[in-house]
Image (cartoon, coloured by chain):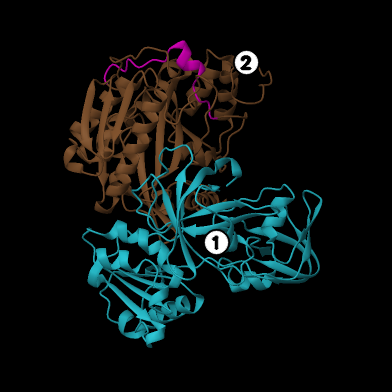
Amino acid sequence: MSESQTIAVQVAAIEQVTPLIKHFTLAPLDGGNLPAFSGGSHIIVVMRGATRTFRNPYSLLSPPNRLEAYEIGVRRMEESRGGSHFLHDAVRVGTRLEIAHPVNLFPLDKIARKHVLIAGGIGITPFLAQLEDLHGGAVPYELHYSVRSPAHAAFLDRLRDREGERVRMYCDSAGEAIPFDALLSTQPLGTHVYVCGPEGLIRRVIDTAKASGWPGSHIHWEQFSVPPVGDAFDAFLAKSQRMVHVLPDQTLLEAIEAAGIDVPYLCRGGVCGFCHTRVTGLDGELIHNDHYLSDAEKSACKSIMPCVSRARGKSLVLDL
Amino acid sequence: MNAAFKPDETFRGDFSYQNSEQAIRRFPLPFPDDKYMYSVNIEPHLPGPQGSVTEFAIDIDEHYVAECRERALVLDAEPLRFQALPHMMSSQWDCLELIMESLSRDYPQHFSLTRHGNQWHWVNRPLQLTQRFTFGDPATLPQQPLEYITRQAPGDWVVMDQREGDLWTEAGMVTTQADWSLNFDLGMTFKEWHGPVPLAHEIGVFDRALRFLLNLRLGAPVRRLNWTMTIHPRLDTAPENYPFWGPDRAMVTAQNAGDLVHLRVELQGLWRLPRSNAVVFGIRCYLISLRELATIPKWARRVHRVLKNLHPALIDYKGLTRYREAAVQWLAPFDDGAPTSPGTAPD
């Protein structure tokens, strides 16, 4: 995307739903309708801070047919580079932001015979919109929602009111855990499983499902990587003959954009593969943080996903 | 559009279809160069110059009313030209919204759409249709949503569901096609659907096209041009009906090629659909006879050269084998060997 395709919005409401999660309602500035979307979609929120511009992906949790406003849930990240802190601390009702058109990298499978949704913590957000798509349909579904403690169970009331017995909650604080083996070994043929949440949860679901004989095409997950903070480094952009300096809490993609060079992207979370960039020279190592490149591609060091990955060493040359 | 509709022209029987001078000048010539080979020639579907076929998202031209009547005739005889698998219903509504919004926004003199929540009111003046319905409730329309709206929209429409890292051809309205069959292709993946295309698989065109389309973004449609040739201005060349139109190819001579042989250009548009996350592929067919084409000297030279030097595999695939030579001979007197200017615009 490029900035010209963003939609201007205004924060219409903010609600603190758990100690760590705030719920934002974003309404279009022109008062018209926002584009419809499908459950599982995310938007990129562009936040123009005093010295830096942040662009973070957030899943849409509002009903996909509600076009007057979008809703997102934002967890305050302990090791934030600034995006979630900006939303939590600097944004007020009335603040103007820009968003990109929704993109769905985590869609429901339309020919599934049953859907099993597994959420951990803030990973509940895409499922809130998907449940709207599923509710009242002919295909059975159930949601398993794992949280630290009842106080951290964001949006639980809204879920229970509508979905009743189709929602199961598991609290770490009460010693409850999702029974992965029992859950995934007893599903009817044609079931699809979807998981969103912490890396450990995602890994556990994928591994258990595969061990239980699930076809890979029926296992879906979404985990946006939070670009980790690292050491500063330099990158040379060979085509444009520019050197960019990447600060410790800045991503390579942000540094390239700050130099005025456009790199296409969709997710900014190491998932979609859109910002795939060729590495033409390296003296040092690449720190791959994405979920897109295969292990072989990562060790080959011929490409990098600049939205989340970094480099360490003497020099990095990119085909940009 | 400013030109008047020509509701009585035909694409069968006496083939009275013709292009006005204005329609000829806006014809989307697909040859930017004197040679042709496949490429992933995809570009953003942004508004083109005023009066061009890309000025608006969906082009309405002088043939609109006649094309809709031709579609109705095909559907009367073969209702399976429209098909949609059950899980494609949300994409059908997405398509209806896309087409109604585009047409009413871009041609307010011909179409209007009034929305009050889910209560919609649609008026199509050229076809003298008006419809009140509930968006999302198929029982409030005379046909399924995609059939209803594509009976009123020019060109073919194919909807692809996105899952398992692929695009699946699972709904469509196909009556103006260049020798392919929705009934045969329904349920296929992207590469299965394009299986018969020669050379392109080998040079990776479909790998790249699929990767690109899987990431197609809402609000950022794209387009490309494709082409072949057809004898007579016949919109419906379906493989199931080959016995009715295939033999026409044997009629072509160097004397009659100017009137019989038509360049058939498809303006293909691709949109990401919002509620279904499906991709809709619009394939709009433009037909022009060699005689009409030759009224633009640059185009006569260029098409002569393209046809003369076309790759043998493409000659076969496009079905030109029997009459290409005749078409080249008919065009030859128009090609004095002078260089052609860059681009496709008439000089």
Chain for colour cyan:
A
Decide whether the magenta segment is chiefly helix, strand or loop. loop
Where does the image place residue B41, in percent across and percent down from the top left?
56, 39
Residue A153 vertical position relative to residue A236 in the rendered view, above or below? below
Where does the image place residue A93, in percent across and percent down from the top left?
49, 51
Query: Please, what is the three-letter code of the amino acid marked with disc 1?
Result: His
Query: Please, what is the three-letter code of the amino acid marked with disc 2?
Result: Asp
Q: Which residues are magenta?
A: B13-30
- The quadrant where residue A193 appears: bottom left
**Alpha-carbon neighbours of circle 2 within 10 Å: few (<14), some, or many (≥20)?**
few
The mark found on residue B119 in the picture is none
- On the rendered structure, is B296 left or right of A306? left
In the rendered image of the structure, the colour used to display chain B is brown
The residue labelled by disc 2 is B347
- On the rendered structure, is B26 left or right of B244? right
Residue B88 vertical position relative to residue A105 in the rendered view, above or below? above
Q: Secondary structure at mark 2?
A: loop
* Whether label 2 touches label 1, CB < 8 Å: no
The residue labelled by disc 1 is A88
